[in-house]
Image: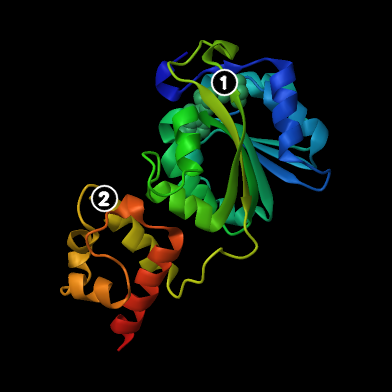
Amino acid sequence: MGKRLGQHFLRNRGILQKIVEIAQLTHEDIVVEIGAGMGDLTELLLNNAREVIAIEIDPVLYKILRERFGLTRNLKIINKDALKVYYEELGQFKVVANIPYYITKPLIFRLIEAENLISMTLTIQKEVAERLVAKPSTKAYSALSIITQYLTEPEIKFYIPATYFSPPPDVSSAVIKLDRRQKPPVEVTDEKLFFRVIKLAFGKRRKMLSNSLISIIDESKEFLSNIGIDPMKRAEELSIDDFARISNELCKICKD
Ligand code: SAM
């Protein structure tokens, strides 16, 4: 089996049970599992949800899953790349998964885009979990932190040492729960522009904000000073409110 596909299996029943408890499932829930592997977590999910949709890219593991679960009524197994699934078509759903680490970032962005997502309980690389919950002026603070915290409430629940996986990965892991917010923590006029400004600012993390924004607005220094933000600051020093203010004020100018 390939290390290439992030195949590190978590077979400790106690830990898997703890993950399922954190997910707070009900028998009404549709649960999506990404990277079902050999199906140990899948089995626990089946006991706690109305329906489980297990996605597994590897045809060998897909066959193992089919053999293990046969025609289990409330399980759908999909042999597909999780980045290519249309989650919008599923109805309201929760994700519980020990995900392949090499697709963590695009997968999280892809999933939180789906408005029908209720929550995610994910086992991911420890450093990425810390980025998702990071606060301004820390090394871990990034575009992913702000966008995740704008759309969800992320909380690290516990850490899992590498030795619990088979074979053990090179990194430590963490279980993180992300609950979709009912209402964003800041008011944003144009979400697309808000995300664009954040990504642009962090694209040149070491640069002054006024330099990063020059591709959107020529007079970026004056613009930032006028709205009460120091143009000398760098992206990592700005809060989610600062980014909301910048994009909302930009939006006004664009519409003039
Ligand atoms: N759920 C199992 C467990 O906890 O033991 C396996 C977890 S393992 C970290 C990740 C799984 O994701 C592997 O089974 C791997 O084949 C699968 N996988 C890798 N890339 C994938 C992708 N793009 N889409 C869906 N599954 C993928």
Image color mode: rainbow
Q: Nearer the viewer, residue 32 or 96?
A: 96
Q: Is ligand 1 less than 8 Å from the beta carbon at label 1? A: yes
Residue placed at 61% from the left, 65% from the top?
183
Q: Quadrant of residue 68?
A: top right
Asked which quadrant contains residue 212, the reply is bottom left
Q: Is residue 217 left or right of 101 when viewed as pictured?
A: left
Q: Amino acid at mark 2?
A: Gly
Task: Using the rendered image of the protein, determine whether residue 34 is visible from the camera's viewpoint.
Answer: no
Q: Percent position (x, y) of residue 142?
A: 38, 46
| Residue 161 to residue 113: above or below | above
- Verify CB contact (< 8 Å) between mark 2 and mark 1: no
Residue at (76, 46) in percent of width and height:
29
C-alpha separation, residue under disc 2 versus residue under disc 1 = 38 Å
Considering only vertical position in the picture, is 54 above or below 242? above
Whether 241 is drawn above or below 201: the answer is: below
Task: Quickly name the residue at label 2.
Answer: 203
Instruction: Give the position of the C terminus as an image quadrant.
Output: bottom left
Task: Identify the residue under disc 1.
Answer: 61
Residue 255 appears at what percent x and percent y? 33, 85
Task: Give the mark, 2 or 1, whose residue is nearer the N terminus.
Answer: 1
Disc 1 marks a residue whose amino acid type is Leu
* Residue at the image point whose x is 47% and y is 43% from the top: 134
Helix, strand or loop at disc 2?
helix
- What is the number of the mark on residue 1? none
Q: Is residue 163 left or right of residue 240?
A: right
Tell me which corner region of the image, top left, top right, bottom left or bottom right, holds residue 181: bottom right
